[in-house]
Structures are given as C-alpha cells and as structure tokens.
Image: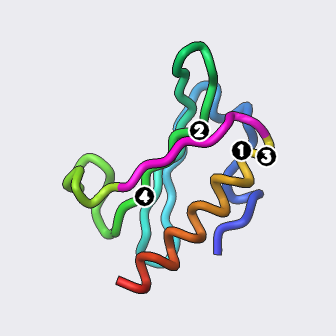
Amino acid sequence: MIKTEDILSLNFYQKEKFTGSDRGMRYLIQKDTENETDMFRVYVWPGPYNFASTEDSKKKTATFPFTLDGKQQVVDYLNAQWVDFQEK
C-alpha cells in the first residue's frame, strides 16, 4: 500500500518527476501546467517494464490539483489502481 509520505513533498515536483512501483504496478507522478494551472499528472501501468518501454495502450493517466489535498488524491488513486490491476 502506498502512503502519503512515500510520494515526497510538493517542492520535489517543481523540478523532478517521480517513478515508483508497488507490488507489480509501476507509476510516474509529475507536475504539469495546463491553462496556467498546476496539477499532478499520474500514469500507471503493469510492470515489469519502465514507462518508455511500455505500450501506451497499457498506461492509464489521471490528473489532480497540485495541492496537499491533490497529493492525497494521487495516493488514493494509486491504491485504487493497484486493486484494479489485481482484479484483472
């Protein structure tokens, strides 16, 4: 299970993206700006391959506000996606 503290601070995302994995599910979190609004963009896909080596059709994406509440939404989304991956 992914915890909020596993996802790092908002400041980290000002310059970097974050990749990780949890029990066979891979994910990438980055800050994007759309219409002058900052947001988290999250990608999930089945392991074991990295983002670049995985077919786009196997990746899912979602966006969330670039706030502390949005960070918690990212964690909740990742954990829900893990459940979905296990059911398939």
Q: Residues within 10 Å of mark 2 (few under 14, many from 20)?
A: many
Quote the CA–CA distance across marks 3 and 1. 4 Å
Estimate how packed mark 1 is, as few (under 14), some (14 to 19) or many (20 or more) residues with alpha carbons within 10 Å. Answer: some
Q: CA distance from mark 3 to mark 2?
A: 11 Å
Q: Are marks 3 and 1 in contact (CB under 8 Å)?
A: yes
Q: Which residues are magenta?
A: 60-67
Residue designated by label 1: 70
Q: Which residue is mark 3?
A: 69
Q: Secondary structure at mark 1?
A: helix
> If the image is split into quadrants, where does the N terminus sit?
bottom right
Q: Amino acid at mark 2?
A: Phe
Who comes first in sequence, dot 3 or dot 2? 2
- Marking on residue 40: 2
- Is the image coloured rainbow, by chain, by secondary structure, or in one colour? rainbow
Q: Are marks 2 and 1 in contact (CB under 8 Å)?
A: yes
Pick whichever of labels 2 and 1 is earlier in the sequence: 2
Query: Majority secondary structure of the magenta segment?
Result: strand
Q: Earlier in the sequence, mark 3 or mark 4?
A: 4
Other-residue count near label 4 (Cα within 10 Å), few / some / many at <14 / 14–19 / ≥20: many
Residue highlighted by disc 4: 44
